[in-house]
């Protein structure tokens, strides 16, 4: 734990936006960064996955954008911002594990490109970010359009990348750890498919003022170290403000 000039924990102040394609390790990195900075954490992708789960449960055709939009308005998930134990709830029930299944993964890009779904969830994401900054001071937000759409005024914007081959291997390891058996070849095909869909949907791109960080040759600790250096370069730790 880092201590400031007055002996208190060095906490994040402001918003860190962490964007990038599927399989770059954003969720792991964002959570650990938030913990290191005593900040809150928001996984916006989990919100789209939760709405996708609601659509699948209701038996709604994912291609019926009107029906999907109608369902989404009444299925905004309640998402926790504690990085040590993030939760995602639909109707009061935690669905954090279920939204990572193959069915949701295969349909989430189609749901995310429905304009009304995006409008509903972006509004909720902005509300959460504003509330956290007002009360707790700092939050790490991860997704695909945080720096460009959700929080364009974020204090630090980072676009996390990695080669498609590396991302496929990482996703396969994550699936195996969660008990989902998928070959690297199948995962690579899904990564390529998601990239194509996400690029058309968001579009998936770094903000003009984002710092691009290629994690292909870095482990998680290496990425965290690089991000903490960027946070310190921007003077975003609360104890930095005290010293000044």
Image (spheres, helix red, strand yellow):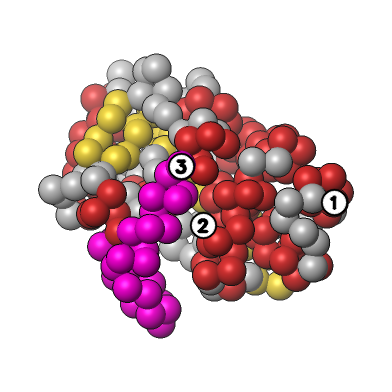
x then y, percent, for residue 147: 47, 28
Q: Mark 3, residues whose alpha carbon is within 10 Å: few (<14), some, or many (≥20)?
A: some
Q: Position of residue 128 (x, y in %)?
A: 64, 41
Of badges 3 and 2, nearer the viewer stands 3
Secondary structure at numbered mark 2: loop
Estimate the x, y position of residue 209 in percent, counting from the top left: 37, 18
Confirm whether the magenta stretch covers residue 36: no
Circle 1 packing at 10 Å, graded few (<14), some (14-19), many (20+), is few
Residue indicated by mark 3: 196
Please give the residue where the numbered disc 1 appears in the rendered image.
67
| CA distance for labels 3 and 2 | 32 Å
Residue at horizontal 22 percent and vertical 39 percent from the top: 214
Label 1 to label 2, Cα distance in Å?
Answer: 32 Å
Specify which label sits upstream in the sequence, 3 or 2: 2
**Based on the displayed image, in which of its 4 quarters is residue 93 positioned?**
bottom right
Question: Which residue: 57% across, 27% down?
Answer: 149
Q: Name the residue under label 2.
A: 82
Q: Camera-side residue: 99 or 83?
A: 99
User: Looking at the picture, does residue 14 appear above or below residue 75?
Assistant: above
Q: Of tags 1 and 2, which is closer to the observer?
A: 1
Q: Residue 67 at x, y = what percent? A: 85, 51
Q: Which of marks 3 and 1 is nearer the N terminus?
A: 1
- Given residues 114 and 148, the one toward you in this image is 114
Q: Quadrant of residue 126?
A: top right
Rendered position, 69 above or below 101: above
**Range of the magenta residues?**
169-196
Counting residues from the start of the chain, the first of labels 1 and 2 encountered is 1
Using residue 76 as the reference point, say whether residue 18 is left or right of it.
left
Q: Residue at x 28, y 30 (%)?
A: 212
CA–CA distance between discs 3 and 1? 24 Å
């Amino acid at each position: 734990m880092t201590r400031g000039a007055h002996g208190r924990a060095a906490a994040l102040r402001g918003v860190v936006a962490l964007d990038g394609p599927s399989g770059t390790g954003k969720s792991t990195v964002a959570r650990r960064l938030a913990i290191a900075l005593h900040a809150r954490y928001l996984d916006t992708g989990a919100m789209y996955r939760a709405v996708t789960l609601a659509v699948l449960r209701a038996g709604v055709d994912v291609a019926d954008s009107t029906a999907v939009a109608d369902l989404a308005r009444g299925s905004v998930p309640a998402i926790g911002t504690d990085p040590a134990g993030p939760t995602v709830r639909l109707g009061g029930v935690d669905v954090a594990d279920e939204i990572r299944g193959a069915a949701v993964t295969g349909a989430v890009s189609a749901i995310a490109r429905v304009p009304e779904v995006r409008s509903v969830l972006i509004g909720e994401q902005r509300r959460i970010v504003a509330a956290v900054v007002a009360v707790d001071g700092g939050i790490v937000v991860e997704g695909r359009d945080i720096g460009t759409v959700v929080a364009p005024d974020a204090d630090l914007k980072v676009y996390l990348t990695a080669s498609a081959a590396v991302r496929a291997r990482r996703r396969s390891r994550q699936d195996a750890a969660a008990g989902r058996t998928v070959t690297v070849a199948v995962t690579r095909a899904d990564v390529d498919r998601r990239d194509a869909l996400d690029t058309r949907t968001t579009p998936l791109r770094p903000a003009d003022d984002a710092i691009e960080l290629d994690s292909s040759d870095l482990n998680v600790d290496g990425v965290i170290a690089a991000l903490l250096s960027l946070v310190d370069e921007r003077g975003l730790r609360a104890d930095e403000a005290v010293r000044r």
